[in-house]
Amino acid sequence: MITSARATALLFPLIVLFAGPVPAAEGTHLAKDLAAVIALLGAPCGEVVSVTRLAENDHLATCSNGIRYRVFVNPQGRVVAEKR
């Protein structure tokens, strides 16, 4: 029978290995999400090639066509994409 301490010792490395998010994958998802938001707002973009986080819910997205948008949530709770 495995004691709880031994089981914890065996599981801990696996938990540490798989618990954290993968930054590259997170960035890819964020770029796709921002591209979708910009498209839904009717602005030309194509694909988001880089993202800079300015603050929580506030990002600067650079599109493949060279246009940059600040995508953020305004005080009324609406998502806005400002051309920069």
Image (spheres, rainbow, N blue to C red):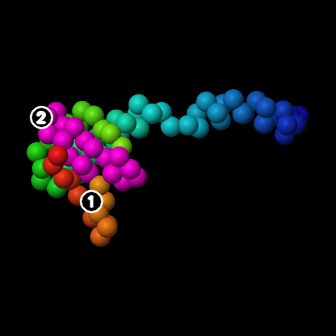
Name the magenta segment's main secondary structure: strand
For the image shown, how many numbered marks are present on the structure? 2
Give the amino acid at mark 2. Answer: Asn
Q: CA distance from mark 2 to mark 1?
A: 22 Å
Q: Point out the residue furthest to the bottom here.
A: 76
- The foreground one among 9 and 3 is 9
Is residue 17 at all visible to an observer of this figure? yes
Residue 34, percent across and down? 27, 46
Q: Which residue is mark 2?
A: 65
- Which secondary structure lies at badge 1? strand
Left or right side of 6 for 82: left
Q: Residue at x 34, y 35 (%)?
A: 28
Q: Is 29 rendered above or below residue 13?
A: below
- The foreground one among 76 and 35 is 76
Q: Could you say which disc has been placed on residue 27 in the image?
A: none
Q: Residue at x 72, y 33 (%)?
A: 11
Is residue 46 at all visible to an observer of this figure? no
- The foreground one among 71 and 17 is 71
Give the amino acid at mark 1. Answer: Val
Q: Does residue 58 belong to the magenta stretch?
A: yes
Q: Which residue is mark 1?
A: 79
Q: Residue at x 55, y 37 (%)?
A: 20
The N terminus - image quarter = top right
Q: Does residue 68 belong to the magenta stretch?
A: yes
Left or right side of 5 for 47: left
Left or right side of 51 for 1: right
* Residue 47, quarter of picture: top left
Q: Residues within 10 Å of mark 2 (few under 14, many from 20)?
A: few
First in sequence, mark 2 or 1: give its number.
2
- Which secondary structure lies at badge 2? loop
Magenta-colored span = 54-71
